[in-house]
């Protein structure tokens, strides 16, 4: 008998409204409602990220929590809010947009995984990765029997077992990279092992997930799952054969330093969508096709970077949070009721943590990793995140996970990721675990024939030629162990999720640049490689991947770990064609100041005017004049010691100019001040100069001169006579009352009074300037006060210089 009940179907939502003045409610139309949803999501997730920042939590925690809060677990308990902002009719549009954003994000994740790096993974990292997958997977399968017997009755056994195993064995590669970068562990041994193991784990998890999806189809015949799996394998195989040739052809047409043609970007994004369509038709999931395409794109060259730059911001910043909300709307914590449900939640959390941590620790100890590092690796490998949510959402959409099981698994992922940062901070303290004797913190030393270690920082390829020429003149002669260079690339860790791409550059920290198996083919590597072969100087790379607010910590910690004698920092301004200086990026100025304040060794700031030209000068062709000005004090002694080291090079002539206050030349107005100062003799200066003069008599490449001065004008006049030098090397804070008069209106107090004079527009020269500060344990007096001053901003200074140039 037919039923007389009629079901009223709501009409589909129109895309746009006619406006409130014509009686339309924007919340009843798809586009304005979607805009409101996006704004609510962004506002809440960014607020939570700001609140969680003091706890150093990754942004994914804020996005997962935000999604849960917007869903039926919290705000969604108010049905008026839920039906107004997230009505059921709008969820199709929201889910579609979220999955489209997720599709491109998985393409970026694939872009971050380098198959070459996986093939080069060491036995230690590979063993840890396998242990971190197999034991949690087995425990997840065991836990699935308990769940099927209680809250997940009636679900298909095979897919449920695999989904539970995959969910517990996953390590979120992107989230782990972000945590390591925030904790400044990327460059440590633990960080390198964790990243290598997580990359292997990530690939294995995707393979297992593909198998789980193939088995979870609704077809009754097992042959359907077999066909799905075979077709998926055929798709991956055909893409692996065809796509690399096409992508390499495109990459060759995208040289470094030139913009990538838009047609290549559009064609690649179209291929990503096509690959997603094929895998969706096969019955796996559209995400797999996008991920495979990302893995196959070559990682070297400008093409991969251009893809990230074009796609990432809008995907990770705008669309990806929608996926967390889509997941949060399916999560109802209220379904976890009663002692049994909460007991199952505790069981799942314990199983996930025990499997990952115990398995990783056990194998790490077998690989002779220290217990504290092994425990740190265990908690790091226990990190979950977006990939975990993808697995859970696919399982829920396929009917493998019910509401209660889904809520339990989401809370498990949230808990395991949340505890990672605080536990790692408490357990792992690399500074305490590796205390080495750090003896030579300055260039001036009692044993000048010992090995010199320099820690050289650079922002971009613009700094490379001058830095290499500085290395060349710093080689010296007769040192046991020679010169060892640590070259650190300073890179900003931004909020962009594909800052993780920088992880690939940090993986091989401490390995030689010329190790072809482990290096990227780029201009920096080629330049340092060539210099190594020509000069036989040991050069080792490292990378600082930090926010500018804490980049100085990376520099100082790494320099201390490498036991460097001096840190060389690029000046935060570069020279324009007209000879004036223009700010490269003001943030680097604050980095330089903090390094000067907290450095564990001497520091030099290099003002680059093109020392030696745009390329490396071979040792036989070096012909430089270096001038060192000596007024007195720690910094000047360090500068003159560095100058004497340079003079050991056969192509260097050193002019050492000492300024002596001559009472006969002092104006009456300054007589008392300077005479008071002159009564205090610095015996350290006299002892140092006596030793230096003995060296001058035996070295014809050094010219020593003493100049009597009575005013700052005399000093300036003498300095101007040496404007044809190739390099000035000076102390940052000379201990001389006359020099202090220069510093009254200093634009860059980190350079000191003489340094500011040498970079001023009035001083016409093509010479680069190296401003040196000697390590003294703790800065005091003017040296410290000058770094705390609030001076004219770089923008104002640049504008003033430009105005002065126009007026002339």
Image: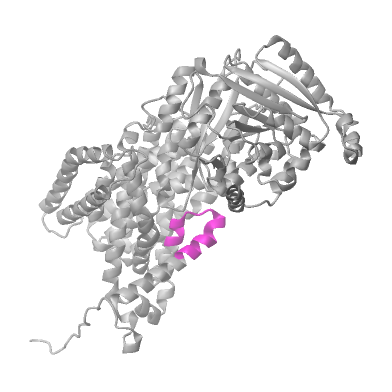
Q: Is 306 placed left or right of 244 in the picture?
A: right
Up-down: is 517 above or below 375? above
Where residue 506 appears, as percent x and y from the top left, is 45, 37
> Which residue is nearer to you in this view: 560 or 158?
560
Q: Residue at x 26, y 39 (%)?
A: 253
Residue 64 located within the stretch drawn in magenta: no
Where residue 481 appears, as percent x and y from the top left, is 57, 16
Q: Is 392 placed left or right of 705 in the picture?
A: left
Can residue 370 be seen by looking at this rendering?
A: yes
Residue 54 located within the stretch drawn in magenta: yes
Where residue 706 appears, as percent x and y from the top left, is 78, 22
Q: Residue at x 26, y 63 (%)?
A: 397
* Highlighted magenta segment, given as a residue range: 45-63
Where residue 746 appears, as percent x and y from the top left, is 70, 45
Q: Residue at x 77, y 20 (%)?
A: 689
Q: Is 704 placed left or right of 312 in the picture?
A: right
Can residue 339 be seen by looking at this rendering?
A: no
> Which residue is nearer to you in this view: 303 or 353?
303
């Amino acid at each position: 008998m037919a039923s007389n009940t009629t079901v009223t179907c709501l009409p589909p939502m129109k895309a746009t409204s006619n406006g409130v003045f014509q009686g339309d409610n924007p919340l009843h139309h798809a586009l304005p409602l979607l805009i409101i949803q996006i704004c609510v999501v962004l506002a809440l997730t960014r607020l939570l990220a700001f609140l969680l920042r003091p706890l150093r939590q990754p942004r994914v925690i804020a996005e997962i929590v935000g999604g849960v809060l917007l869903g039926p677990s919290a705000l969604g308990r108010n049905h008026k809010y839920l039906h107004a902002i997230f009505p059921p009719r709008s969820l199709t549009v929201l889910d579609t947009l979220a999955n489209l954003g997720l599709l491109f994000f998985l393409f970026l994740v694939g872009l971050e995984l380098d198959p070459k790096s996986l093939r080069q993974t060491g036995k230690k990292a590979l063993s840890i990765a396998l242990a971190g997958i197999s034991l949690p997977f087995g425990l997840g399968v065991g836990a699935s029997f308990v769940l099927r017997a209680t809250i997940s009755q009636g679900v298909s056994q095979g897919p449920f077992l695999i989904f539970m195993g995959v969910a517990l064995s996953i390590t979120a590669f992107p989230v782990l990279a972000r945590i390591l970068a925030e904790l400044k562990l990327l460059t440590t041994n633990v960080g390198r092992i964790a990243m290598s193991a997580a990359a292997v784990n990530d690939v294995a998890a995707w393979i297992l997930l593909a198998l789980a999806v193939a088995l979870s189809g609704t077809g009754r015949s097992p042959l359907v799952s077999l066909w799905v799996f075979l077709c998926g394998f055929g798709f991956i195989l055909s893409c692996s054969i065809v796509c690399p040739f096409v992508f390499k052809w495109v990459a060759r047409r995208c040289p470094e330093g030139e913009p990538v043609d838009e047609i290549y970007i559009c064609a690649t994004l179209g291929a990503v969508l096509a690959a997603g369509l094929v895998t969706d038709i096969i019955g796996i999931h559209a995400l797999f096709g996008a991920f495979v395409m990302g893995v196959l794109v070559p990682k070297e060259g400008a093409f991969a970077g251009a893809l990230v730059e074009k796609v990432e911001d809008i995907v990770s910043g705008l669309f990806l949070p929608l996926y967390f909300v889509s997941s949060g709307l399916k999560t109802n914590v209220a379904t976890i009721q009663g002692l049994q449900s909460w007991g199952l939640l505790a069981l799942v959390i314990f199983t996930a943590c025990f499997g990952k941590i115990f398995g990783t620790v056990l194998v790490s100890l077998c690989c002779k990793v220290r217990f504290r590092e092994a425990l740190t690796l265990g908690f790091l490998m226990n990190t979950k995140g977006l990939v975990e949510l993808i697995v859970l959402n696919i399982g829920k959409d396929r009917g493998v996970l019910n509401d209660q099981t889904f809520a339990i698994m989401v809370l498990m992922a949230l808990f395991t990721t949340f505890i990672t940062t605080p536990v790692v901070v408490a357990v792992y303290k690399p500074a305490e675990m590796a205390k080495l004797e750090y003896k030579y913190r300055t260039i001036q030393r009692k044993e000048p024939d010992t090995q010199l270690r320099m820690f050289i920082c650079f922002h971009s390829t613009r700094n490379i030629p001058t830095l290499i020429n500085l290395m060349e003149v710093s080689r010296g002669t007769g040192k046991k162990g020679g010169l060892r260079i640590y070259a650190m690339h300073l890179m900003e860790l931004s909020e962009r999720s594909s800052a993780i791409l920088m992880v690939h550059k940090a993986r091989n920290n401490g390995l030689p640049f010329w190790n072809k198996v482990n290096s990227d083919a780029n201009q920096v590597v080629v330049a340092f490689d060539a210099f190594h072969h020509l000069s036989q100087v040991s050069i080792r790379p490292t990378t600082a991947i930090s926010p500018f607010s804490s980049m100085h910590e990376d520099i100082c910690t790494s320099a201390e770990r490498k036991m460097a004698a001096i840190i060389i920092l690029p000046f935060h301004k570069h020279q324009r064609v007209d000879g004036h200086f223009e700010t490269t990026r003001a943030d680097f100025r604050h980095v330089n100041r903090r390094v000067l304040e907290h450095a564990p060794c001497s520091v030099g700031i290099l003002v680059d005017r093109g020392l030696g030209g745009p390329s490396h000068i071979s040792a036989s062709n070096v012909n430089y004049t270096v001038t060192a000005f000596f007024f007195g004090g720690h910094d000047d002694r360090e500068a003159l010691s560095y100058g004497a080291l340079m003079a050991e090079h056969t192509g260097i002539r050193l002019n050492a100019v000492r300024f002596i206050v001559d009472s006969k030349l002092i104006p009456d107005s300054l007589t008392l001040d300077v005479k008071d100062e002159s009564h205090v003799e610095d015996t350290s200066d006299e002892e140092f100069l006596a030793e230096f003069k003995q060296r001058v008599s035996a070295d014809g490449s050094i010219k020593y001169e003493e100049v009597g001065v009575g005013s700052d004008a005399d000093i300036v006049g003498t300095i101007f006579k040496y404007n044809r030098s190739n390099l000035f090397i000076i102390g940052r804070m000379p201990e001389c009352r006359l020099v202090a008069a220069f510093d009254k209106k200093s634009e860059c107090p980190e350079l000191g009074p003489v340094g500011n004079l040498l970079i001023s527009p009035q001083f016409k020269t093509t010479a680069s300037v190296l401003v040196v500060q000697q390590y003294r344990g703790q800065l005091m007096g003017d040296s410290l006060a000058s770094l705390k001053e609030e001076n004219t901003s770089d923008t104002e200074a640049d504008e003033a210089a430009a105005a002065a140039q126009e007026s002339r």
